[in-house]
Image (tube, helix red, strand yellow):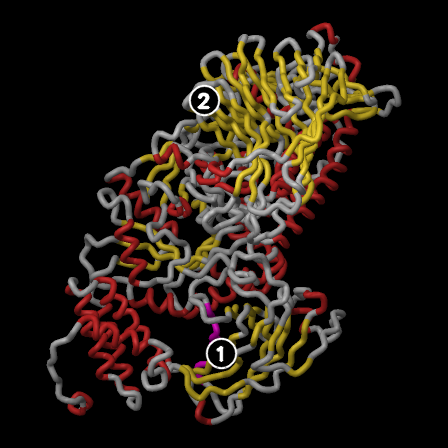
């Protein structure tokens, strides 16, 4: 009967462009909105009245339990609130009491939504304080206004909620654009607060038309499927009657028949996983991220109950830990969804850290704390490393991943390359030591996929491995500022799961995706990338926010020292309390600051205020813990001094005692009386100083340094090789630093064309002239407002020259500062320290791949050598290097104005050093010298209690002992690595220990004993001496990291 009522079909010729535009206009909210189905999605709108609102004092983010507590000491003052009012300023918090009463019988048996648009972020709670859903205001693609109150409304029915309003947007409160510095005076209009009847048939049919139009437009007039989509969509629009709801259902049925036409078996398979990228801090502070995280989890959990196929992958153990602490009822729901397989913990790390700047040991601790959290809370480790947004990836990450029980890796950031397109989507990434991990870069080139037809079409076109694979991953959901999947995304996914003309799109999990490509790998074999994953973009992150980078480096090595001396203290004094709880707290503070928008220096100023507080806390608490541990080895004596060397090799250096320079040689792992290790100056020739009208000339047995008074530039003569090795060194260089868009992130190739010299040298003078040390001091005006104060140190016992530097960097804008050394070296490669190893990179620019690496990462050192000799540039807190042709440079400071307009402004203190050497850098001791520059030889008043200590040391300098720490009950963890890039055999000595270990085991980096049948689990031939020293042999392949677990009897 219904069919008979339809008008007689009229067959007409259709113009593709006109009929496509018809669809677009039908869907556009500015055209005919009330005359088409779009205007029928929400009806019977009723604005909320009687709302009460309270502003929290001092912009505090108070928990909901305090809002619900009538005895709340915050003393919230409730006032009338409503639509049309402005709320602010930026970062303020308001709480709304919302009471809803279904106003009439028109709503009976209907689905009713709360619609809320505050143009900012919010969270809806029930009256028990349980978070229900996050809200995102505004009109962007990430908007989330709607909440389903009931599906069966009845007149007079009442509902009560609390709404927490955060006066910031999804991307903070940038002034003018998202990445601009925050506008502290921003206010937000509560534009909508109402209830309305929701008609799902109207919504579904509108979305059907929208998707059909996308298919038509994307596949085009030349495609049969595109033309079919256009016809179906236009037929639907023609048949729809605004007054006859039966046509809405019939239209949806027709659309679903189209979407249900299946693909062939050979079509590309897309595994679709919902994801919400939550920056732990970026354009908002850490405390706001806690609320962003809760909003995201609450929303996605609600959607899981609505859509059975919805799975949601979330990384960052820290985010889960915050929910456990701050939102316990939500966390219980999260645990349920993990058990159901819908909430997917991924990543295995504490935070999504920067893949460049943390040390190798920090990488390991990120996995250690992350994997332990996931296993203790959810009974499972993560087996996929998930780092979609870091700005490049260290060459040693594959080894560290695998050592932490992960052999799968997902990212997409390399798609941001500006110069060269990365050749693979799915591949084996081979690390520095030869370890490989199966890696996938989702070819949609995004982690905020919107589930649109153009994106899927681009994904299969952009897929780089079509000859080997027909499977890829997509990560859908709004992100950076949280949010995750929207209702529209999930409705789209429901329609497009296997629609002819598009790839086969499967709601899936990350594990299922990797299972599928592992099968393909077995059949065909993926190709291999054997190098770092260098991002040809965002090179400024090696330098921006110098204080943060310094805090990280100093914190890493302070925590190493606490663990080292604390572990030894426990094994010489059973009554000593190893401060594991405090160490956990300090490590977590350090690790949160290693997030990929914090340590790189790409967040707003508020974030760095917090970061510097954390570093200060690490130094204050850590210094006390270190002193307490070291005191276990000495007894107080007013006449004596004791030196502590935690390095696994002997160190020879000059230390300052009672205003006097003393040359000492401290044994590896030694706790020794100062008087026992002083070296007579006669071992080396004295330092000599000559002054002329134009220069200062300082020489020792190894070098002659000439500093020109006119400009402070130096020349360096290497006596051992009878050659001038530096001709114009220690040149401060200023550059105009105006990248294309991402100011704090980027330094671009053209900056090299803008180099200029400092304004003038104020003066150079001799401040110390001793037979073992000569020190020159100079003052240079870089600009009208910025000044360098530097002392140059030449020592009797080494060719190393230290440049101890203080810079007042003031009122600079878009200026970068470097120091450069013009060498006489000829080599096409330079070597840079990376995490637990080193890497060669080109110094010439023969190819586009070479050219792209004009600014690169190095940790403690960079070496530039030719056969027989070379020069190394060391530092104690810098990361940006460049070696081009024969010039070495170290990047010191920047001055971008977004997102932090005060980036690097202030006073900075740091040291860099120049080390000319014979032969290769390995045998010349460059690695050891860099450790000495970064890890001080501690001196304490008193004399040692024990006749000798070894700490942990190696007989082979290629084998560096990096870690000595307490493990689980009655165990000790030791970690060493091969640093030369060679096969190395050596003996390790640890001690003293009161008790002999029961066993020494090989273990992974999670400190779990190796049980793989392919490997020995127990170290053989262990010797335990009468005075408590443990000795055993170790054999390592190039760059191998090896961890040992020593098990002791219960005390």
**Pointer 2 or 1: first along the chain:** 1
Q: Nearer the viewer, residue 357 or 639?
A: 357
Image quarter of the C terminus: top right
Find residue 486 and report its horizontal and vertical position in percent: 42, 67
Asked whether, in this view, residue 812 is left or right of residue 536, the answer is: right
Disc number placed over residue 1037 in the picture, else none? 2
Image point 43% across, 24% down: which residue? 829
Asked whether, in this view, residue 2 is left or right of residue 109, the answer is: left
Above or below — where is 508 with respect to 953?
below
Residue at the spot of label 1: 115
Image point 57% across, 81% down: which residue? 84
The residue stretch that appears in magenta: 143-152
How many marks overall?
Answer: 2
Find residue 306 and report its horizontal and vertical position in percent: 41, 70
Asked whether, in this view, residue 48 is left or right of residue 810, the answer is: left
Q: Few, some or many C-alpha atoms within 10 Å of disc 2 (few <14, some 14-19, many ≥20)? A: some
Question: CB under 8 Å between callouts 2 and 1?
Answer: no
Label 1 secondary element: strand
Is residue 381 one of those drawn in magenta?
Answer: no
Label 2 secondary element: loop
């Amino acid at each position: 009967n219904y069919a008979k009522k339809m008008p007689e079909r009229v067959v007409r010729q259709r113009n593709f462009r006109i009929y496509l535009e018809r669809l677009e206009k039908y869907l556009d909210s500015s055209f005919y909105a009330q005359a088409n189905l779009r205007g029928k999605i929400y009806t019977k709108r009723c604005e909320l009245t009687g709302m009460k609102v309270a502003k929290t004092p001092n912009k505090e983010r108070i928990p909901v339990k305090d809002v619900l507590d009538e005895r709340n000491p915050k003393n919230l003052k409730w006032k009338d609130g409503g639509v049309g009012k402005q709320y602010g300023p930026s970062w303020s918090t308001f709480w709304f009491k919302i009471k809803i009463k279904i106003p009439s019988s028109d709503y009976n048996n209907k689905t009713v939504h709360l619609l809320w648009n505050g143009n900012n972020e919010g969270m809806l709670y029930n009256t028990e304080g349980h978070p229900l859903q996050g809200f995102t205001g505004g009109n962007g693609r990430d908007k989330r206004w709607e909440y389903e109150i009931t599906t069966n409304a009845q007149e007079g029915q009442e509902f009560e909620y609390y709404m927490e309003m955060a006066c910031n947007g999804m991307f903070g409160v940038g002034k003018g654009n998202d990445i601009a510095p925050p506008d502290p005076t921003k206010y937000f209009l509560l534009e909508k607060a109402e209830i309305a009847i929701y008609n799902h048939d109207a919504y579904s049919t509108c979305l059907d038309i929208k998707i059909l139009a996308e298919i038509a437009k994307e596949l085009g007039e030349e495609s049969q499927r595109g033309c079919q989509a256009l016809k179906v969509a236009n037929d639907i629009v023609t048949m729809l009657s605004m007054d006859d709801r039966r046509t809405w259902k019939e239209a949806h049925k027709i659309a679903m028949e189209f979407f249900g036409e299946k693909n062939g078996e050979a079509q590309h398979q897309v595994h679709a996983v919902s994801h919400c990228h939550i920056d732990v801090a970026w354009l908002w502070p850490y405390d706001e991220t806690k609320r962003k995280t809760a909003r995201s989890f609450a929303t996605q959990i609600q959607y899981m109950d609505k859509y059975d196929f919805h799975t949601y992958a979330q990384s960052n153990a820290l985010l889960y830990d915050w929910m456990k602490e701050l939102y316990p009822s939500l966390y219980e729901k999260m645990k349920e969804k993990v058990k159901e397989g819908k909430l997917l913990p991924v990543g295995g790390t504490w935070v999504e850290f920067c893949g460049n700047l943390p040390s190798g040991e920090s990488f390991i601790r990120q996995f250690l704390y992350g994997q332990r959290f996931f296993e203790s809370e959810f009974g499972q480790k993560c087996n996929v490393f998930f780092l979609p947004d870091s700005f490049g990836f260290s060459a040693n990450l594959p080894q560290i991943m695998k050592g932490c029980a992960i052999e799968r890796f997902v990212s997409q950031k390399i798609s941001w390359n500006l110069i060269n397109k990365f050749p693979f989507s799915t591949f084996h990434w081979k690390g520095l030591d030869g370890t490989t991990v199966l890696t996938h870069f989702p070819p949609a080139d995004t982690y905020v996929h919107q589930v649109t037809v153009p994106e899927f079409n681009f994904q299969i076109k952009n897929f780089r491995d079509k000859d080997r694979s027909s499977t890829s991953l997509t990560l859908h959901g709004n992100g950076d500022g949280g949010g995750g999947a929207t209702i529209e995304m999930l409705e789209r996914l429901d329609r497009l799961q296997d629609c002819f003309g598009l790839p086969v799109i499967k709601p899936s999990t990350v594990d299922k995706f990797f299972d599928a490509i592992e099968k393909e790998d077995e059949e065909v074999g993926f190709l291999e990338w054997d190098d770092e994953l260098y991002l040809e973009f965002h090179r400024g992150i090696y330098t921006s926010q110098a204080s943060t980078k310094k805090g990280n480096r100093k914190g890493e090595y302070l925590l190493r020292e606490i663990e080292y001396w604390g572990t030894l203290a426990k094994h010489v004094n059973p009554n000593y309390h190893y401060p594991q709880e405090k160490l956990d707290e300090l490590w977590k503070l350090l690790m949160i600051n290693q997030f990929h928008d914090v340590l790189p220096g790409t967040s707003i100023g508020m974030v760095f205020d917090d970061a510097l507080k954390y570093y200060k806390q690490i130094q204050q608490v850590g210094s006390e813990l270190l002193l307490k541990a070291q005191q276990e080895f000495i007894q107080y004596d007013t006449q004596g001094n004791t030196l502590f060397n935690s390095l696994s090799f002997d160190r020879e250096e000059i230390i300052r005692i009672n205003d006097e320079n003393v040359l000492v040689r401290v044994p590896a792992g030694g706790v020794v009386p100062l008087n026992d290790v002083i070296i007579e100056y006669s071992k080396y020739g004295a330092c000599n100083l000559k002054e002329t009208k134009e220069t200062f000339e300082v020489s020792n047995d190894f070098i002659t340094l000439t500093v020109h008074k006119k400009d402070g530039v130096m020349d360096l003569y290497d006596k051992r090789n009878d050659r001038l090795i530096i001709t114009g060194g220690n040149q401060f260089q200023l550059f105009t630093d105006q990248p294309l868009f991402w100011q704090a992130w980027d330094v671009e190739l053209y900056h090299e064309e803008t180099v200029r010299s400092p304004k003038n040298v104020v003066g150079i003078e001799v401040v110390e002239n001793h037979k073992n040390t000569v020190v020159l001091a100079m003052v240079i005006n870089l600009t009208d407002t910025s000044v360098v104060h530097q002392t140059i140190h030449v020592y009797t016992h080494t060719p190393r020259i230290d440049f101890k530097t203080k810079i007042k960097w003031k009122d600079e804008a878009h200026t970068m500062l470097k120091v450069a050394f013009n060498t006489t070296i000829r080599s096409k490669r330079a070597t840079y320290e990376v995490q637990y190893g080193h890497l060669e990179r080109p110094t010439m620019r023969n190819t586009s791949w070479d050219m792209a690496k004009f600014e690169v990462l190095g940790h403690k050192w960079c070496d530039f050598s030719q056969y027989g000799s070379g020069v190394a540039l060391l530092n104690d807190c810098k990361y940006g290097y460049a070696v081009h042709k024969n010039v070495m440079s170290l990047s010191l400071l920047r001055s971008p104005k977004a997102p932090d307009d005060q980036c690097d402004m202030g006073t900075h203190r740091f040291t860099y050093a120049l080390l000319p050497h014979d032969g290769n850098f390995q045998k010349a001791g460059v690695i050891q010298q860099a450790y000495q520059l970064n890890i001080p030889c501690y001196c304490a008043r008193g004399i040692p209690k024990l006749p000798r200590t070894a700490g942990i040391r190696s007989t082979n300098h290629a084998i560096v002992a990096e870690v000595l720490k307490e493990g689980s009950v009655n165990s000790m963890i030791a970690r060493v690595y091969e640093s030369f890039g060679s096969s190395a055999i050596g003996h390790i000595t640890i001690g003293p220990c009161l008790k002999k270990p029961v066993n020494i085991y090989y273990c992974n980096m999670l400190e779990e004993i190796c049980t793989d049948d392919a490997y020995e689990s127990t170290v053989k031939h262990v010797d335990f001496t009468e005075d408590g020293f443990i000795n055993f042999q170790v054999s390592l392949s190039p760059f191998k990291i090896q961890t040992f677990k020593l098990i002791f009897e219960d005390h």
